Amino acid sequence: MARAEEAFKPGALEEGVIDLCADLVSREFGDARRAVDLLRVSGEVTAESKSSVVTKDHVGRAWDRVNRDWVREMILDFPRGHRLFSACIAYAHLDEEYATTGEAYSLYKGLMEETGRAPLGERRFTEIINELSLMGLLNAPKVSRGRYGYTKMITLRLNPETVLDILFPKWRELKSATHD
């Protein structure tokens, strides 16, 4: 709180702005440094809008911006296999609400074969699903399909287009070329 008062002129922060930054970040990350980053970006958004007071609306717009940056950083830090897997799940989510383990693996295996790389085994693939679930990137509850056995219903917690934009900026061109 004291650092925010030193960083901003008196009256430059609408009441409740600091609490909002802390609340938003604590729900997702629990990292005070990210709250300070959010407040800094809120100040930038305020300056861009030629306003002199940081409002809750500015914090909301800054939240969208920093969240996108944090997600980008997280995804680009993944090992190659995790990034390819994330791209496959995101691609499957463009047209469907969820992907099953089998559907995601088939998409992944096809991508690996097209690029001349050896795909991971299904067991390791399932372990990656669990790891990405623990990171908060996706939800993957195990569900029974009756006599067809159990599968994971994989849903992204992020916008699939955002994930694809980060990993494969030209994916839209490729998708339109394959659907012509």
Image (cartoon, helix red, strand yellow):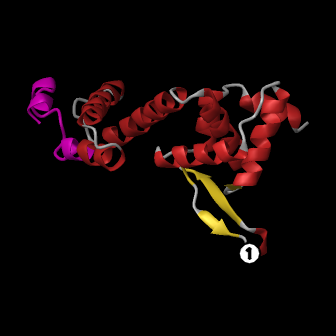
Q: In the visual, does 100 lie left or right of 14? A: right
Q: Residue at x 59, y 37 (%)?
A: 162
Q: Residue at x 55, y 49 (%)?
A: 130
Q: Residue at x 61, y 32 (%)?
A: 83
Does residue 102 sit above or below 73 in this rendering? below
Residue 169: image location, x then y, percent: 66, 25
Quadrant containing the N terminus is top left
Q: Quadrant of residue 69?
A: top left
Does residue 44 sit above or below 62 in this rendering? above
Q: Is residue 16 magenta?
A: yes
Does residue 124 sit above or below 3 in this rendering? below
Location of mark 1 (residue): 146
Residue 17: image location, x then y, percent: 22, 42
Residue in the foreground of this view, choosing between 65 and 125: 125
Q: Which residues are magenta?
A: 1-20
Quadrant containing the C terminus is top right
Residue 81: image location, x then y, percent: 64, 32
SS class, disc 1: helix
Q: Residue at x 75, y 34 (%)?
A: 119
- What is the total number of numbered labels drawn onto the structure image? 1
Does residue 80 sit above or below 19 in this rendering? above
Residue 141: image location, x then y, percent: 57, 61
> Can the viewer see residue 95?
no
